[in-house]
Image (cartoon, grey):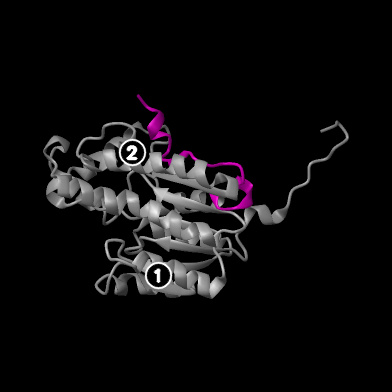
Amino acid sequence: MSDDDVLTFDESARELRGKKGVVLGIANRQSIAYGCAAAFRFLGAELALSYLNDRARPFVEPIADELDAAIFMPVDVSKDGELEAIFETAAETWGGIDFALHSIAFAPREDLHGRLVDSSAAGFAEAMDISCHSFVRMARCAEPLMGKGGTLFAMSYYGAEKVVSHYNLMGPVKAALECCVRYLAHELGPKGIRVHAISPGPIRTRAASGINEFEELLSVAETRAPRHQLVSIKDVGVATAALATQAANLITGNTIYIDGGYHIMG
């Protein structure tokens, strides 16, 4: 680049108009996945949204209506075919997709609340399958639909990197998820597919309510984070949506912390 060259920028690099994406894991309006879906939609994307089962549908359907979701389907990743079905429908409806977000985690209560050393083989395997391997399966479904490249997102947490009291079994599971992000970024990068682990600070969600002493965790995060405030689903949503734009074209394979700086503290 010479001194006479002038940089120019494409306005479309900061929007998602005309883009299509699948968002998995909305449970209600407190869900991190809802914050992301709303931000994707704000930037102009069309969405395919999932709900877990008939019991969850009444909480998610108003969100699908609000966001004008083109596709709204049940996805329980523990049931054969349901994950694959939403991507098949996206292929039939749109021909391809540009991004997909995975915000799904589960561990049996007795294994989550107990020590890692006491966790059952069955509980560990179930947590790993639903919380981690289903993201790998999502990537497998999305890959052939991203002929022009795209972005994949997985939701993680600081407990994947450092020991967080009461996070227990989910720490190793989220660590495995973040490792999968790096390997998928390597494998899919030549096709223009970017892969990110998003690591928000603690947020009051239905999933988080299953963690013992969660209110104490919130208090510690707010006190110790350099910004001295808790992150919101809106904060996570807008940052995640930005990573789906072409402005983030050469960012991949990282764990992106959206936690007010809490993760830098010793």
Label 1 environment density (alpha carbons within 10 Å; few <14, some 14–19, many ≥20):
some
The structure residue drawn at horizontal position 30% and vertical position 51%, both measured from the top left corner, is: 131
Q: Which residues are magenta?
A: 243-266
The circle on residue 153 is none
| Relative depth, front residue between 194 and 205 | 194
| Relative depth, front residue between 132 and 41 | 132
* Residue 204 in sight in this render: no
Find the distance from the CA under tag 2 to the CA under tag 1. 28 Å
What residue did someone put label 2 on? 175
| Relative depth, front residue between 263 and 135 | 135
Q: Residue 21 in the image: state x and y as whole percent.
A: 51, 63
* Residue 172 in sight in this render: yes
Q: Image quarter for residue 34? A: bottom left
Q: Is residue 258 magenta?
A: yes
What residue did someone put label 1 on? 85
**Lower sequence index among marks 2 and 1:** 1
Q: Residue furthest top?
A: 266
